[in-house]
Each structure stands twice: as C-alpha cells, then as structure tokens.
Amino acid sequence: MKRTFNKLAQLLLAATAGVATAAYAVNDLPGGPAVRQLNLHAPATKIAEEQYFLHSMMLVICTVIFVAVFAVMFYSIWKHRKSKGYKPANFHESVTVEVVWTIVPFVIVILMALPATKVLVAQKDTTNADLTIKATGYQWKWGYDYITGEGEGLGYISTLVSEQRVMSDEGAKGKVPDNYLLEVDNPLVVPVNKKIRIITTANDVIHAFAVPAFGIKQDAIPGFVRDTWFRAERTGDFYGQCQELCGKEHAYMPIHVKVVSAEDYTRWVDAERKKAAAKADDPNKVWTLEDLLKRGEKVYASNCAACHQANGKGAGPIKPLDGSAVVLAADHNQQIDVLLKGRMDKGMPSWKQLSDTDIAAVATYSKNSWSNKTGQIVQPAEVLAERSK
C-alpha cells in the first residue's frame, strides 16, 4: 500500500513539474539533495519513511477529491447548460445531501488523522535514547556536545569548510563539488541503529536543526531547549541545513551527519578523546608570539575569515580588523570582551565557545597581522580572567 501511494505521488509530482531546465553542473548527493528532486528525500529512518507515506497518501487523496469534485461540477455545468434548454431547479435543502457531505469528509479526515497522529506522537518520544547530543546554533555554525552515552564529554564546532565559502564568494565558477556548501570540517558522527536524541538551543538568534533524510526539523532558540530524535537505519553521509533565516550567513550553515557502524563509532570516540587530551591546554601556560601566531592563523581561517576576509579588511557592514582601534589597543580586555560577548547590534557573534588559548591566539594574530604590527601578545590567562568576570 505504501509503495503504491509513493509511486502515485511521484507520478503526480512529475506531471506538474513543468519543462526541464538546463543540465546541472553537479550530480545527486547520496544522503543529500538530488538534481531535479521532485519528492521528499529518500528516507533513512522509520520516522522519515512514515512521513513519506503520509505525504504521498494525502497528496493522492487530495488529488482524487479535487478531480472528482471538479469533474462533477464541470459535467453538470456542461450537461445542463442554458443553451440546451435546461432551466435551474428551484429547491432549498436536502437532508440526505447534507448528511452525506458531512459524514464523508468526516470519515476522510479521520482516516488521514489517525496515521498522522501516530507518527506525530512517535516523533516526540525522545525517551530511552542511546545517545544524547546537544546541538547549539551559532552565527553561523553548529556546536555539538555529547551529553550522555558513548562519547560523553566530547564537544566541537562544525563549520563550512573555508574553500567552499571562497568558491561561493567568487561566484562558484566552473565545476563545483557535489557537496557544494554542505562540506564541513567536523561532521556530527553517530552510530547506526541507535536512538539519537538531539537537544537544540542557540547562542544568538533562532536557528533550526534539520536533516530531511532523518525526517527531523527542530528550532534552536536562545535561552530554551527543544529536542528531537532519529535512528538511522543505514550507514553513510547525510546532509541538512539550518532552516530558520538567521542572518546574512544563513546559507553557509550546513549540517553533515556521518552514520557509522558501532565498531567504527567506538574507534572514532577513542581518537577524539586522544585529540581532546592533546588540545587540553593549561590556561596558565605562557606562550611565545611565534606559537600563538601559528595557532591564531588557523583559528582565524576557520572562524573569522568568512566575514572579516583573509586580508582583515572586512566587507560591507563588517568592520575591518586591519587598523581597528580595538585590535590595536594596548588594553587587551577590549578585544577579549568583544570576542567573548560579541556585538550583536553590529553583526559580531560571541566566540565564547572557543577555548581560552584559541581566543588568545586569534587575538594575538589579529594584533600582529596585515598592517597591525603591535608586537603585543595576549595570553590565555587574560582570556580566562575576563571570562570569569
């Protein structure tokens, strides 16, 4: 039955798709959007499969009702037109007709509501999760924190890779990759066939965590927590995007979920723990200018260059860092405060999710790059002190 409804829905959508456009420069992306995709994405979870069926079923039912009602109406108009000598009947109510057009729609609505309610209730049941992950929306990236389950304590930021952002700035000329504007530096990694609970919130404005193949979409609201869940039934890479207009970089906020086997997930967790231990810097460590510049260059490229540009000149409303009074100031707390708290009225998000060392490194880098040759060094202890206020 489900396959029949799905095939009928595909035919109905194809019939109304219109004239085909010129060939795309990209191919279908497994786990992501397909070229000329007419229907919902191929489901990778039971919930998404049920949503697909509901969509197809209701499309078919509505189409049948539409055709039937208008067929009767147009037939009646044509068959009993005035030019053939018909005269309009003069009558008021018909109890039989009123009973029929009340009962039939009621039955149809109930038949549609029952399966829809069952799926809706299942969508909201986030109990007994094998893994709980908090997804925090930032302008414009995602932060993932593994709260419970295997991998508990891990956390990282997931950002669109800088190469694709540069490609977009240049107009995406020539051949673009199939995962254009969907490739991130750190995907969300989860095990297959495990119930994954996603807790959503946001650091600045409203975002929305959505992965079509999983059938999930949940708003991420500052100061509030919402949750959703999925259980991927196959391994692979699956893609989504922020689906709430969240500012000028909204189009550069992809979601990449990598579903792996249980064994591969365990290996990934072990590797990430080793990386986290290696990056666990002592905030009281005194760094040299050379080491901070090397680290700061990487932090800047991953987080700041998209807005302030690689040359520090900024663009449009984005203030330049090259020659900035705040950056050049001998009082380091001015710049540290901006990095920690942001300036939302000026489009500058908070970067408090970065470590004390990363903030110190990027501050030092900006103070000693381009024409900013101050020789100043911002140490992690200064960031820690400002963060603690």
Image: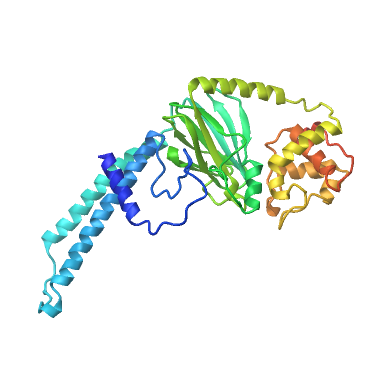
| Residue 297 left/right relative to 10 | right
Q: Could you say which is closer to the camera, residue 150 or residue 52? A: 52
| Quadrant of the drawing holding the C terminus | top right
| Residue 102 left/right relative to 325 | left
Q: Total marks drawn?
A: 0
Q: Could you say which is closer to the camera, residue 8 or residue 314? A: 8
| Quadrant of the drawing holding the N terminus | top left
Q: In this view, does 4 lie above or below 149?
A: below
| Quadrant hosting residue 54 | top left
Task: Name the residue located 86 percent from the left edge and 48 percent from the top edge.
Answer: 371
Q: In this view, does 276 lie above or below 328?
A: above
> Residue 113: in sight, yes or no?
no
Q: Where is residue 218 in the image (x, y as percent from the top left)?
A: 49, 42
> Residue 226: in sight, yes or no?
yes
Q: Could you say which is closer to the camera, residue 370 or residue 272? A: 370
Q: In this view, does 313 lie above or below 270?
A: below
| Residue 107 left/right relative to 211 | left
Q: Position of residue 163 (x, y in %)?
A: 65, 43
Q: Where is residue 175 in the image (x, y as percent from the top left)?
A: 58, 48
Task: Name the residue located 25 percent from the left edge and 46 percent from the top edge.
Answer: 110
Q: Position of residue 88 (x, y in %)?
A: 13, 76
According to the image, what is the colour scheme of the structure?
rainbow
Task: Name the residue located 63 percent from the left edge and 41 percent from the top edge.
Answer: 161
